[in-house]
Image (spheres, rainbow, N blue to C red):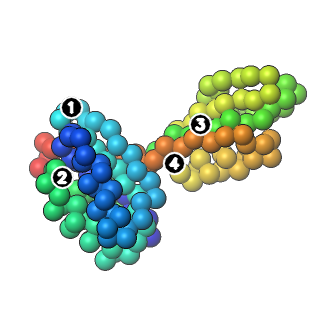
Amino acid sequence: MKHTISVLVENHAGVLARVAGLFARRGFNIDSLAVGITDDVNVSRITIVADGSKYTLEQIEKQLNKLIDVIKVKTLSPESMVSRELILIKVSCTPKQRPEIISICELSRGKISDISANSVTIEISDSAQNLNNFEELLRPYGIKEIVRTGTIAIQKGEQAVSVKSI
């Protein structure tokens, strides 16, 4: 089962390496990893998606909490979070195919980022499943390149994973 873990850490050099090293030493695989600063420039949020059992998840949480630079660890349940990824996808495109691809893009709430004589680059932010579906819709046109971010996630409602909520 996939688990989304939100980790608040001190914004120092080497913190990400220590977190990733912990996963490597324990043999835990990271499916997705995204890092960015929060509203406090001294704190970064690492969003990790990892696959494993409930026991594996407990071990990950315990090990993360042992790291000095870790401020807070919270596992987000699928029903209590909003998660998104960003994809940039470059598709082969003749001028004749361009209206079809633009239509697919508009229906999927994507944005054309670049158009050249023989390709179109589209950006779209959505759930991982919707991005997979979007990619499959464009596959018949010939995908030239895909760049995808890791998952970012936030709790729904009033609850927050923040330093202030400690």
Q: Is residue 85 above or below residue 116?
A: below
In the picture provided, is 166 more to the left or to the right than 60? left
| Label 2, label 1: how far apart the Cα atoms are | 15 Å
State which tag comes first along the sequence, 3 or 4: 3
Q: Say the numbered circle drawn on residue 70.
A: 2
The kind of residue tagged 4 is: Ser
The mark nearer the N terminus, 1 or 3, is: 1
Q: Position of residue 3 (x, y in %)?
A: 39, 63
Q: Nearer the viewer, residue 125 or 69?
A: 69
Q: Mark 3 — residue?
A: 88
Is the C-beta separation of discs 2 and 4 under 8 Å? Answer: no
Q: CA distance from mark 4 to mark 1?
A: 27 Å
Q: Crowding at label 1, few (<14), some or many (≥20) Cα neighbours within 10 Å?
A: few
Mark 2 residue type? Val
Q: Which residue sits at x=28%, y=62%?
A: 22
Provide the secondary structure element on which disc 3 rests: strand
Q: Residue at x 31, y 59 (%)?
A: 21
- Three-letter code for the amino acid on which mark 1 is drawn: Val
- Judge from the rendering whether residue 36 lies leftward or rightward of residue 128; answer left or right: left
Residue identifier under label 1: 41
Q: CA distance from mark 1 to mark 3?
A: 27 Å
Callout 2 environment at 10 Å: few (<14), some (14 to 19), or many (20+)? some
- Which mark is on residue 127? 4
Question: Amino acid under label 3?
Answer: Leu
Please give the name of the residue rendered at 88% of the width and 27% of the height, measured from the top-left corner: 96
Q: Residues within 10 Å of mark 4 (few under 14, many from 20)?
A: some
Tell which of 159 and 67 is nearer to you.
Answer: 67
Q: Position of residue 94 (x, y in %)?
A: 85, 29
Against 78, residue 149 (above or below) is above
- Dot 2: element: strand
Of callouts 2 and 1, the N-terminal one? 1
